[in-house]
Amino acid sequence: MSQDTTPASLTASEAARRIRDGELTSQELVQSCLDRIDAVEDSIGAWTHLDREYALAQANAAQDLRQAGKGVGPLHGVPVGVKDILDTSDMPTENGTVLHRGRRPMKDAAVVERLRAAGAVILGKTVSTELAVYSPGKTKNPHDPTRTPGGSSSGSAAAVASYMVPVAVGTQTNGSVIRPAAFCGVFGFKPSHGLIPRYGILKQSPPLDTVGVMGRTLEDTALLADVLIGHDSRDPHSRPMAASQISRIMAEEPPLEPNLAFVRTPVWDQAEESTKDALRELCEHLGEIQIMDLPPIFDGALEDHRKIMEADLALSFAREYRDGKDQLSKVLREMIERGQQVLAMDYNDAVARIADYQAEIDEIIHVFDAILTPATAGEAPVGLDATGSPAFCTIWTLAGVPALTMPILQGPNGMPLGAQLVSAKGDDARLFRNARWLLGTLNEE
Amino acid sequence: MSQDTTPASLTASEAARRIRDGELTSQELVQSCLDRIDAVEDSIGAWTHLDREYALAQANAAQDLRQAGKGVGPLHGVPVGVKDILDTSDMPTENGTVLHRGRRPMKDAAVVERLRAAGAVILGKTVSTELAVYSPGKTKNPHDPTRTPGGSSSGSAAAVASYMVPVAVGTQTNGSVIRPAAFCGVFGFKPSHGLIPRYGILKQSPPLDTVGVMGRTLEDTALLADVLIGHDSRDPHSRPMAASQISRIMAEEPPLEPNLAFVRTPVWDQAEESTKDALRELCEHLGEIQIMDLPPIFDGALEDHRKIMEADLALSFAREYRDGKDQLSKVLREMIERGQQVLAMDYNDAVARIADYQAEIDEIIHVFDAILTPATAGEAPVGLDATGSPAFCTIWTLAGVPALTMPILQGPNGMPLGAQLVSAKGDDARLFRNARWLLGTLNEE
């Protein structure tokens, strides 16, 4: 994965700057990414749809616009990978299932509209697990092809990690952005629920579904988040708000030295010893860090998440189950069948508790500036028949709070390991500022 | 019910003007209402909590403020009746059930805060049916004590109809504002879902629960609605929006002569012949009116409403059922028991269809200016053991669209009968403008 001097190795921020300043053309950048894809895609399998000529045609159009002095957005001419559960009006969107093979939506997801408005080149569609749940696609971990890249945003994480594209979009309903990002060794960000609109994206579970972003640097991750965050009334959970300013606030110095809490969730025992050690070492590097357990109310959080997600899968994929049950994976079929049995009052009870979880996290963030916690139990597991446990992401997804994984640790086999920073709902920008401070602290040593 | 010349007979708008202009004091008005209550409350039973001295103390305070030239709001010094499921920091709130006897909340419902900010005197708490569902309280219909006042906002409707208070607040989850208003012969308005915040109000079913208002004139109904509409983030369904302008827009002339649609819902067959005749005559008075049935999608609407409401009752009243089952009415117990069986996927499927119902009503309001339809099947039924059928309200509550009942018809026994005007979600102000036009048209004849 080592960086080289080709345009494909540039960050999105730097590439955008060079294109803006005339030092690089979008065609050169896209061609460099395509060359990289030609070299490594066979062994990684990050893409489900990629039309090289069409990608270059978009690059030409971006370059023409720039030449004409028009529409140079923050991602002008920069290629982006898009998970294949986001509708694209000009490419297939097959949602990781054979049941949707050949599907060609006529509209763009809100997120894709925003990417195009920012000038991005939609390079292609990245592999999703089956209907963005657990059953893996063809993608392998770029650091070790015998290991899972994680899921469900497998292709997005692998493509960014292997320099096929500088940034990519994924989604998370349990651990589908943070986990693959951590396994593949890139930054992954799941914003607060309601910030990035989900119109035109495969619906799994509206209280949980969250769009997220991946990049090789914190700056790129922030840049892509700023482009995608914004109100869209076509998503009923989308929150009206002023323009996102993550990049700007991230660049500021924290007014006080951030005070982190190392938080052990109810799944802490599932963490591998090497993960505990790595986190412990990180805490020592950072100095005085309070170690704490989540309050007992969180003991039921994973069960609440399971109820909500499975009941919603049963409704969202009712047609797929009814007409194509045999072509669903066993794991998804069983989730749907459990979900069919969930009672409305139990579902709504669990949904109502989301506010309680948020309030408890608010309490922590009232005292501490961010929560530090593992992103996964350990390194990406060996084997391509599963995508690893999402358990270290579940609580933060359920609570709808922002979570960011940073590829700053290493596992016992030299695989990347993520450190996850979490904050209170809505506090996405300060989360990035604290992450930048943390990275800076590590680099000083 | 005939009007007299005491201050209690004034409209809220006129009383507020006289208090503002120094022609009337709040004490005189409140005392007049209390006199009226002394005269008729024994035979009507509209109030569950009424502290005469405390009401007068509020009137004194309002008058002192006015004297000091401070805080003269749109309801300054005007008494308002508040349904006893809205929390009041200074009066009991017992939710119509013996299980909550002696309950004294420490905070005001958002709506009560808004009333106080507008200068209103909270005269007292009006009778609600058991937990705002079907089982009646003590209230009798002011027009005939052998007949139901309707429910669940029984006391609010009866108090306004019998000149005990000029305006009152109620709530509707099925037909609980429109039905009692129609049965008691007053105006009743259920705004679009999400306009009036529900913080501090007994929760039955969040997708359905709606605060509504009652008055003896359209102007008073609009005035009270304008005071109560507004965003409050403590209600997650509350919509951020600019200030309500129902009164202002209502006063304008419609740019075109309104074009009404007489709509027969799937429960049309439940309407009494005399109701059908009364509506038919009204349509003839109004000239060319298109008669239409709702599209077939609405055939399942009452069942969708039932599923949502009963599943939510099961959760909202889980504690009451678990610990006080024997002190719940049989009808509520059975609703809760059915609700306990509703599956999450069926519930969420029904909730998802709300948007489809709204879209169909939008289509109608794209062509017509308002829907005209009965408010109830007929006059208030004889008997005080039930509150009458809410079926003519259910669809509009489920769809979250604004509905207004006007006391302009009469039943075969001389009891009031309501004509219901309905519009598209969010189009509350034009609904009032069209209602004013309709009332004007009738008065011309």
Image (cartoon, coloured by chain):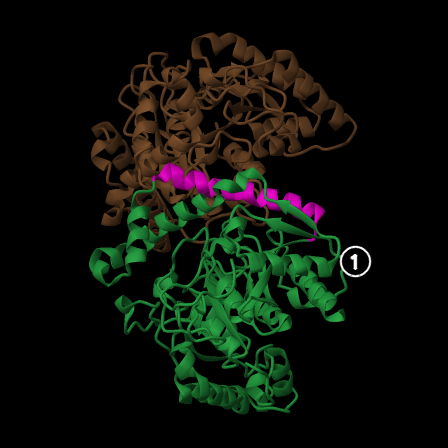
Chain colours: A green, B brown
The quadrant the N terminus of chain B occupies is: top left
How many numbered markers are drawn?
1
Tell me the residue at 20%/34% (across/down).
Answer: B269
Q: Is residue B271 visible from the viewing direction of this image?
A: yes
Q: Above or below — where is B16 with respect to A375? A: above
Asked whether residue A356 is drawn in magenta, I would say yes
Q: Residues within 10 Å of mark 1 (few under 14, many from 20)?
A: few
Residue A217 left/right relative to B270: right
Residue located at (40% from left, 41% from top):
A347
Mark 1 sits on what residue? A255
Q: Quadrant of residue B325?
A: top left
* Whether residue A380 is situated above or below residue B42 in the rendered picture: below
Q: What predominant SS class does the magenta segment belong to? A: helix
Q: Nearer the viewer, residue A315 or B113?
A: A315
Residue B295 in sight in this render: no
Q: Is the residue A388 above or below the residue B342 in the image?
A: below
User: What segment is highlighted magenta in the picture?
Assistant: A343-369
Where is residue A340? Give x, y as percent. 29, 46
Element type at mark 1: loop
Q: Chain of mark 1?
A: A
Q: Quadrant of residue A257?
A: bottom right
Residue B261 position, x and y percent, is 31, 46
Q: Which residue is nearer to you in this view: A316 or B141?
A: A316
Q: Quadrant of the C terminus of chain B?
A: top left
| Residue A239 falls within the magenta-colored stretch | no
